[in-house]
Image: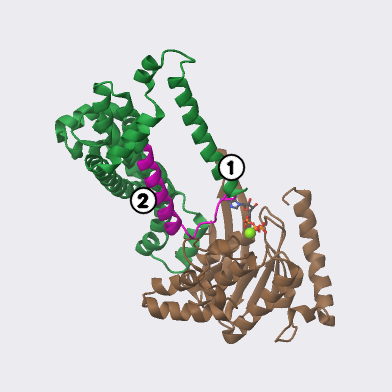
Chain colours: A brown, B green
Amino acid sequence: MMKQQAIRFDGVGIDFALAKGNVYQALAPVDLAVADHEFVAIVGPTGCGKSTLLNVAAGLMRPSSGAVSVFGRPLSGRNAEAGYLFQQDALMPWKSALDNVAVGLLAAGMPRDDARARATDWLARVGLAAFAERYPHLLSGGQRKRVALAQVLIRDPKILLMDEPFGPLDAQTRVIMGDLLLDLWAADRKAVLFVTHDLDEAIALADRVVVLSAGPAARVVGDFPIPLERPREIADIRDNAGFHALHREIWRTLRLEVQQAYAQGAA
Amino acid sequence: MNRPLIVVLQVAVLLGGLLAWHLAVTTGIIGSPKQLQFFFSTPQQVLLRTWTDLAGSRLWGHIGVTLTETLLSFLIGSLGGIGMGFWFARKPTMAAVFDIYIKALNALPRVVLAPIFALWFGLGIWSKVALGFTLVFFIVFFNVYQGVREVSPVILANARMLGLGERQLVRHVYWPAALSWMFSSLHTSVGFALVGAVVGEYLGASAGLGYKIHEAEGVFDVTGVFSGMLILMMVVIAIDFLVGLAERRLLHWRPKVATE
Ligand SMILES: Nc1ncnc2c1ncn2[C@@H]1O[C@H](COP(=O)(O)OP(=O)(O)OP(=O)(O)O)[C@@H](O)[C@H]1O
Ligand SMILES: [Mg+2]
């Protein structure tokens, strides 16, 4: 029997309606599956449709064609199995870090004190025990991403959707956040769909790297297994001989798409 | 900026102004002091009158009436504005239908309503509360309406993904957003509540600061008018200070603006 698929795109296409009846085809029918416990990274030139793909997986956007299934069941409406770490800041500015993390549990009906106790615990896990009472605007970009990560993980979703979660952070912080993520992920190995524009990061984190082509009508142009052994240490992974071979191979595919995106003026 | 220096300069401006006023109406450089004092009074007289008024008990009664009217129109106007703003923001059809009427009503200069309100609600505090209400309501309404409608879509999507249902969205997202917009208009709406009270009193009442000023004008008591205005200003500054304190408590999650 095949490994169970956490999320599966079957011929998912997305058309955006533009002004004057024009249509922009963002995604050509895409077939893609993420097995349970598998960490898949998606790379592709800017504007190719990575966030769109995640929005579809989250159930926030209906595909124009094709279908999405989650653990074998067709998805309609919000994907209740998924936690989504957005590309933009999405914390509630009027709630402290602690309350932001606790809100998902409150929504699920957990009593306030229990929810706050669990949230305190999660803030400690992402290294922010001392910042529980801070409001988002008093946190650094990296700290806000940690809060967002705790906010999503505290609900223990079976699927984790992450959209360039470390995008705006500096190089050192990205390494630290990557290690933190791998640590947390190792606990129960959720299925992950991780979007990034950083190929190094994709290879360091994932079991598989999927390359999307430049838009319009983006499709999957490469699907590379990453057989590097775990646990991995991101700072050291570049010393691994296998890493460079993989990087060269994937970059050959990715570069063409990035060049095409530049040529079209998408970047 | 050097804070003490600013205060010293502010006091200097005040003293300079008073001195200029004093010299102008007492020395005869612009005209007959007697005549000028009839029209412009003198700083000493105004301050003295204010002082004796503040020492007596009648004035405090007037202040009490004005503050009661201000508070009531602020509370009722805010509640109405929040309720209506919320409702309209969540029911776009409703908003679309009533939009034009709300705009029309808001465009009406409120002073013309004062006599009608006096007719409907009598010369007591409620006609003033009604006038203040018409001012406060629209400010709070527009702010809350906009606040609820412009909640960041990403925050909303995130909240939905975290499992919040419609009612929980109201409680954790829409409501705080609406309140923050209402609080950010606090200075304006409290100020307008006071304007409603004073204008109402001015146009017909038997108590309140507006009435007191009107009464003094009726007998050409310029000292009384100026002293009434002075007291009104002190009341406004005191209220504004309290609002500032409240705002700092309620909006502590907000980033401070750069100028602070
Ligand atoms: N609502 C919309 N209407 C029309 N076009 C849209 C809409 N949303 C996205 N697009 C277009 O769809 C394409 C894919 O957008 P998407 O945000 O998924 O890109 P992305 O791969 O996440 O880019 P980035 O790496 O810069 O975040 C872009 O060309 C974008 O302009
Ligand atoms: Mg994106």
Residue A35, horizontal then vertical, whole percent: 59, 79
> What label does residue A22 carry, if any?
1
Label 1 in the same subunit as label 2: no
Residue B210, located in which quarter of the rendered image? top left
Tell which quarter ligand 2 is in.
bottom right
Q: Main secondary structure of the magenta part?
A: helix
B232 relative position to A185: left or right: left
- Mark 2, Cα crowd under 10 Å, few <14 / some 14-19 / many 20+, is some
> What label does residue B90 carry, if any?
2
Looking at the rendered structure, the kind of residue marked 2 is Arg
Asked whether A87 or A43 is in front, the reply is A87
**Mark 1 sits near ligand 1, with its Cβ under 8 Å away:** no
Residue A51, horizontal then vertical, whole percent: 61, 61
Residue A129, located in which quarter of the rendered image? bottom right
Residue A123, horizontal then vertical, whole percent: 54, 77
Looking at the rendered structure, the kind of residue marked 1 is Asn
Does dot 2 land on a helix, a strand or a loop? Answer: helix
Q: In the rendered structure, which segment of residues is drawn in magenta?
A: B233-260
Task: Kindly identify the residue that appears in the image at 84 percent across and 76 percent down.
Answer: A244
Task: Kindly identify the residue that appears in the image at 34 percent across and 38 percent down.
Answer: B231
Q: Is residue B56 above or below residue B251?
A: above
Residue A60 in sight from this viewpoint: no
Q: Farthest residue toward the front?
A: B27
- Confirm whether the magenta stretch covers residue A177: no
